[in-house]
Amino acid sequence: MDRDVAGIILAGGQSRRMGGGDKSLLSLGKVRLLDHVAARLKPQVATLGLNANGDPVRFAAMGLPVIEDTVPGYAGPLAGILAGLEWAAGQAGCQWLISAAGDTPFFPDNLVERLAAATHDRPGAIAVASSDGRWHPTFALWPLGLREALRHFLVDEDNRRVSAFMERHGYVSVEFPMIEAGGHKIDPFFNINTPDDLAAAKSLLQSLGP
């Protein structure tokens, strides 16, 4: 557990490719997709929150604070990250926010450790995960001091591109290895957008075993 890092699970999207609704509440194995994400992230952080919009009661079983976007209009992942930064600023001792997508159940259990290590020589930079040569902007470690700049970027400039904000403020990329499962290499940041993706995730879960 990193004592100065708060975590936010991003589940505020509209899940159009899954047919709408909360795809993070779909079953994956014996529990919900969101339960897998929370179980991986919670041991890595001092405190954990969930970014979601609408009635928070549907997430009550999670036992996590539900943080709504503070920018209207479903402004995408950056809106959830901004809400997370503003929430984390009120958590005692927290200096960083780790963001994780709520539809990505197999991300590394050393995500925070490795991203934090990459910022030792660049304390103001955003550390972002990558795999197989491709970066994953929703899996990143954010300095809390960026929240005002991010609000300006989202609201005043009306720019919603996570990568564009990272490029402006400086980032370091951290490469994570592929998962070996059933003789295949699987991206640990494989995310579930469609029913076919969910079926593939169920097969991967079985091949990884208990």
Image (cartoon, rainbow, N blue to C red):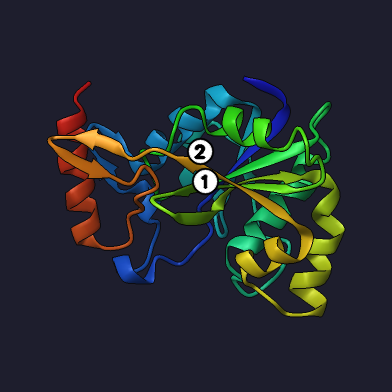
Q: Indicate the position of residue 50 as horizontal and vertical percent values.
A: 58, 44
Question: Which residue is drawn at the image coordinates 30% and 34% (left, top)?
Answer: 31
For mark 2, give the secondary structure. Answer: helix
Q: Badge 2: few (under 14), some or many (20 or more) residues near its Cα, within 10 Å?
A: few
Q: Could you tell me which residue is drawn at 23 percent across and 31 percent down? A: 30
The answer to whether the residues at label 1 and label 2 have Cβ atoms under 8 Å apart is yes
| In the depicted structure, whether residue 45 falls above or below residue 153 | above
Examine the rendered structure and indicate whether residue 58 appears above or below residue 113: below
Q: Whole-percent x and y of residue 146?
A: 82, 53
Label 1: which secondary element: helix
As drawn, 107 above or below 197 = above
User: Residue under circle 2?
Assistant: 60
> For the residue marked with disc 2, what is the amino acid?
Ala
Q: Quadrant of residue 18?
A: bottom left
At x 80%, y 65%, the residue is 151
Q: Which mark is residue 22?
A: none
For residue 159, side relative to residue 205 (left or right): right
- Residue at image position (78%, 41%) is 122
Q: Which of the two residues, 31 or 152, is positioned nearer the viewer here? A: 152
Front-most of 181 and 122?
A: 122
| Mark 1 and mark 2: Cα distance apart in space | 5 Å
**Is residue 156 placed above or below 37 in the rendered structure?**
below
The amino acid sitting under disc 1 is Val
**Residue 30 in view here:** yes
Position of 111 with respect to 150 (left or right) is: left
Residue highlighted by disc 1: 57
Circle 1 crowding by C-alpha within 10 Å: few under 14, some 14–19, many from 20:
few
Please identify the quadrant where the C terminus is shown: top left
Tell me where residue 52 sits by quadrant.
Answer: bottom right
Instruction: State how many labels appear.
Output: 2
Give coordinates of residue 109: x percent, y percent: 46, 28
Q: Position of residue 145 (x, y in %)?
A: 86, 48
